[in-house]
Structure formats: structure tokens, C-alpha cells
Image (cartoon, rainbow, N blue to C red):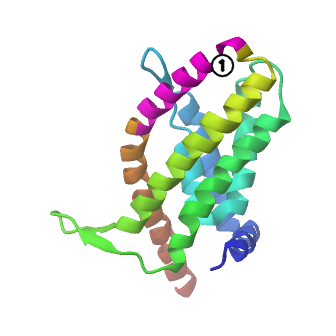
């Protein structure tokens, strides 16, 4: 699958009822996860990105972009804080694009696996792509785009930029240490569950 055809194939997911239903469920899951952020003193760990990661993995960057937009808009409606700025919504959509680009192509490639002590096969490529996706999300979205927007809108005073960057870097590194193990568990489970859902649907249609 080429880079641009990935977006076309992902767009076809909008025509599939099951894809849209699963996407809607995970958008709702994202809203629920927003309530369970963990305060570690100097940072809050938020797991809402997990739902976007799953959507990107299952349905690709186009659906991921739409899901990111929807999560931001619905999140604002559920937890309205300050003014609504559409540019932040676009950035949220780009988060879904990152996970879609990194994780969606793995469905069309033979991925190396390793067998754990319990006898289960572990998709190594999925874990590598998950780590890359989360790293790009942290760097591009959190550290670069959101920092630049916060500076532009005055949420970060220009004279305190270096201090803010240092704090954001420390926060995101701490969150990354927590996020990656959870992501490594969540994605294979979600992928296996979705495959079983498809197999069950096919079996019922043949019955």
C-alpha cells in the first residue's frame, strides 16, 4: 500500500457500518478516559490518546483525522473550558493522522512475531510502530504545535518560553514512560478483538 493510497483506503471505511460504529464507540471511550487523568504533581497523565490510537490502527489516517476532530469538539461540549479555537481542533485531527499513518499499514504486511513464554505470538512490528507513533505524537503535537499555539495565543508568556518548554518536555517524557506499556497492551488486544468481531460477523452471515 502506497502512502497516498493509504488515505484512499482509509476513506472507504466511512462507507462501512461496522467501522463507523466501532469508531463512535472509541470516541465515546475517549471522552470517558478524559475523566480518569492521573495527577502526578507536575503533570497530568491522560489516556484519551489510546482511543485515537486504536481508531488509527483499525481504520487509517483519514478516519483517524475525523475521529480526532470529533473528540476535540465533543470534548469541548462536554468539558467547556475557555474559548473554542478551531486550530486546536485541527491539531487534534492531526494526532489521528499520525496514528493512522504509523499503524494502519501493518494490516497489509507480513510482520515478524516472537513467541512469549505463555505461547502467544507477539507482533513486533506493531509494537515498533506504536512506539514511533506515540513518540511522533508527543514531539509534533504536544511539544511543537501545541507549544507554538499556546505561545501565539498568549497562554505561554514569551519571556517564560524556555521554562515552559523545559516543563513540557519533562512532563511529556514522564507521560511517555507510562503511556508506552499501556499502548503495547491495548493495541494488540483491540486488534485481536476486532478480528474476532469480523470472524463472528462472517460466521453469522453464512449461517
Name the image quarter holding residue 7.
bottom right
Q: Is residue 48 rendered to the left or right of residue 123?
A: right
Query: In the rendered image of this protein, does residue 103 appear above or below residue 140?
Result: below
Residue in the image at 64% along x and 41% along y: 141
Residue in the image at 64% along x and 46% along y: 27
Where residue 74 sits in the image (x, y, percent)? 74, 36
In the image, which residues are magenta? 159-176
Query: In the rendered image of this protein, does residue 94 appear above or below residue 155?
Result: below
Magenta highlight on residue 171? yes
Where residue 187 sits in the image (x, y, percent)? 45, 56
Q: Is residue 111 rendered to the left or right of residue 58?
A: left
The residue to which callout 1 is attached is 161
Predominant secondary structure, magenta span: helix
Badge 1: residue crowd in 10 Å (few <14, some 14–19, many ≥20) = some
- Nearer-the-camera pick, 148 or 79: 148
Magenta highlight on residue 112? no
Where residue 108 sits in the image (x, y, percent)? 53, 79
- Residue 137 visible, this angle: yes
- Nearer-the-camera pick, 43 or 157: 157
Q: Residue furthest left?
A: 117
Secondary structure of the residue carrying tag 1 is helix
Q: Residue furthest bottom?
A: 206
Amino acid at each position: 500500500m502506497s502512502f497516498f493510497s493509504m488515505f484512499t483506503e482509509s476513506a472507504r471505511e466511512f462507507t462501512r457500518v461496522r467501522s463507523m460504529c466501532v469508531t463512535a464507540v472509541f470516541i465515546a471511550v475517549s471522552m470517558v478516559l478524559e475523566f480518569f487523568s492521573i495527577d502526578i504533581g507536575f503533570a497530568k497523565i491522560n489516556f484519551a490518546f489510546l482511543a485515537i490510537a486504536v481508531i488509527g490502527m483499525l481504520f487509517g489516517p483519514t478516519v483517524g483525522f475525523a475521529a480526532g476532530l470529533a473528540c476535540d469538539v465533543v470534548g469541548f461540549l462536554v468539558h467547556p473550558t475557555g474559548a473554542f479555537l478551531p486550530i486546536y481542533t485541527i491539531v487534534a485531527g492531526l494526532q489521528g493522522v499520525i496514528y493512522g499513518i504509523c499503524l494502519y499499514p501493518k494490516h497489509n504486511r507480513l510482520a515478524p512475531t516472537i513467541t512469549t513464554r505463555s505461547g502467544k505470538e507477539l507482533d513486533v512490528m506493531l509494537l515498533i510502530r506504536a512506539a514511533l507513533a506515540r513518540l511522533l505524537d508527543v514531539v509534533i503535537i504536544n511539544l511543537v504545535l501545541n507549544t507554538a499555539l499556546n505561545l501565539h495565543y498568549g497562554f505561554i508568556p514569551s519571556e517564560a518560553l524556555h521554562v515552559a518548554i523545559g516543563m513540557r518536555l519533562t512532563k511529556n517524557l514522564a507521560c511517555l514512560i507510562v503511556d508506552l506499556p499501556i499502548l503495547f497492551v491495548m493495541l494488540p488486544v483491540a486488534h485481536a478483538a476486532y478480528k474476532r468481531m469480523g470472524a463472528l460477523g462472517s460466521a453469522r452471515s453464512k449461517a
